[in-house]
Image (spheres, rainbow, N blue to C red):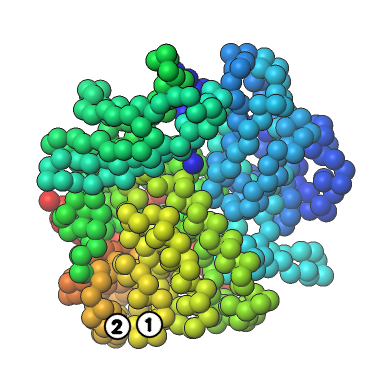
Amino acid sequence: MLRPQDTPTRERRSLAGLWDFRLDAAGEGLSSGWYEGPLPEAQAMPVPASYNDVLVGTHSRDHVGDAWYRTTAFVPRGWAGQRVVLRVDSATHAATVWVDGTEVMSHSGGYTPFEADITDLVTPGEQIAVTVVVNNELSFQTIPPGYVEDTPQGRRQRYFHDFYNFAGLHRQVWLYATPHTHVDDITVVTDLDGTTGVVRYRVTAAGDDSHDVRVRLRDAEGTEVARTTGPEGELRVVDAHLWAPGDGYLYDAAVELVAPDGTVIDVYHQSVGIRTVEVRGTEFLINGSPFYFRGFGRHEDTPVRGKGHDDVFLVHDMELMSWIGANSFRTSHYPYAEEVYEYADRHGIVIIDETPAVGLNMGIAGGIFGGPSFETFSPETLNATTREAHAQVIRELVARDKNHPSVVIWSIANEPESHTEAAREYFEPLFALARELDPSRPVGFVNVMLSPHGTCRLSDLADVLMLNRYYGWYVQTGDLANAEAAWRTELEAWAGDGKPIIITEYGADTIAGLHSLTPEPWSEEYQVAYLEMNHRVFDSVDAVVGEHVWNFADFRTSSGGVFRVDGNKKGVFTYDRRPKAAAHALRTRWTAERD
Ligand code: GCB
């Protein structure tokens, strides 16, 4: 799915700003027709943002159900004769949208964009009202899953993942215009033939067919390096400047629809990073060279905004990543804002791109976290409908992110139940789907500690082994010597599988400012010692090709467990991005290893 952009034939208008907003815990908005006119008793709400922490009080923080947003906007006069589209970059977790009281689209899934052609509903030069009702409820049939419990004091959202269920319009909302005949989609896959870059592309167009497709590839200086015509084809770049970690070199493909008389009907600019990704034995190769992942599992979570995308934190967080010597991160545990991938493309940062399939493991929910226990896969819990929702989030992830050179692995789930036959039945078709949608990238999932080597029924389906392990934290707590021995034993067993291993999570909760002479859990000294212990283990196993500390920064969680003190404190940086001692220790390790 193409991201809106301004080109000589296209124009976009952001609807970011203050919208009218109203929570609807009673669920009366729909039957009262709140989409027909101004929202009664509305208050102001910034878009993009999670609404939870912007307002004050438990009614917003712990709201369950619908939340209504409304704004007005002028459709530019200059858009007469164009196709007009309304696009929501994300609405968490489901939404329905109206334009001037007419329903135009609904979408489930909180982290991918959706859009509707609203040409017939608008008159350029006139104002429209856009109303969005966003629902934050999770069920056993949504991804991620959860359930709503009726308690004597009202409805409560329960879920099985360890981050706060922030909700709202988290990203941009766009009005944009294209010609009626327009570029609808572009797929680019790159390869190398010696030093020649090979760019294979496919363009689909919508509208009438009396046009040709022309693709012109320019280098970063704007010099044309290749051109061709046709909806599918190949461009060859002699002595290509490759996209590589730390070198986000991008070519620009101008994709044009050209009328028989030579008029350019539509043009879309697709960035192209020429690079290859390959798994060979226990190595992970980018452009044929072994790559070692250094970085973090992260969250989209910043003070007050919650999951609202914010360019200030985007750039600041990436600056901190660069300062510490990180070269990569995982979009734990959902697709991030598209701005993040564009930044990563441009700066040579490597991404493991994850679906929102997190918490598909009732063993953690009912076991470790002490909640009620459920069977993970059953007709009443995660079932065929859930799997279809899961397939849909994979489709939407690949459709949105397939052209980003920064994305090198698809992670189709985080820590699902993976030791049972039911898990295998559930996941086998999803691995096949991800590979069919994108044969060019390795596919994996993130394995949980509860499925150690020898018990996991999914790891043979993955191209790369991604392991989350907390030796010295959740097990052997405070006993780093025994943790080290147990961890090494398990890791050596995984290494025997002959695949590259990325440690996608290891971490220890740490209260910034808490110090101890001997490494006591929760102290800054313990976090440093814990990371050093892990690094000794990784450095002794050749098949390990990456280390992602959990987590880049402290983050919000639900308040439903005694495990968390004001959220999850495994950050190497605090919630407001101050370094803990571990940040300096990591920087020493990660910058020393730089070439
Ligand atoms: C995990 C999860 C992550 C949690 C983390 C923790 O294994 O993947 O979402 O936040 O552990 O801190 O417990």
Question: Spatial distance from mark 2 to mark 1, Cα to Cα?
Answer: 7 Å
User: Which residue: 38% across, 50% down?
Assistant: 578
Horizontally, residue 495 falls left or right of residue 46, namely left
Specify the amino acid type for callout 2: Glu
**In the rendered view, would you say 452 is above or below 81?**
below
Is the C-beta separation of discs 2 and 1 under 8 Å?
A: yes
Label 2 crowd (10 A; few <14 / some 14-19 / many >=20): few
User: Which residue: 80% across, 66% down?
Assistant: 153
User: Which residue: 23% across, 41% down?
Assistant: 198
Which corner quadrant of the image does residue 545 belong to?
A: bottom left
Compare residues 187 and 44 and report the one nearer the observer: 187
Disc 2 designates what residue?
490
Earlier residue among tags 2 and 1: 1
Residue 171 x %, y %: 55, 41
Dot 2 falls on a residue whose secondary structure is helix
Residue 235 x %, y %: 25, 35
Disc 1 designates what residue?
452
Specify the amino acid type for callout 1: Pro
Compare residues 124 and 560 and report the one nearer the observer: 124
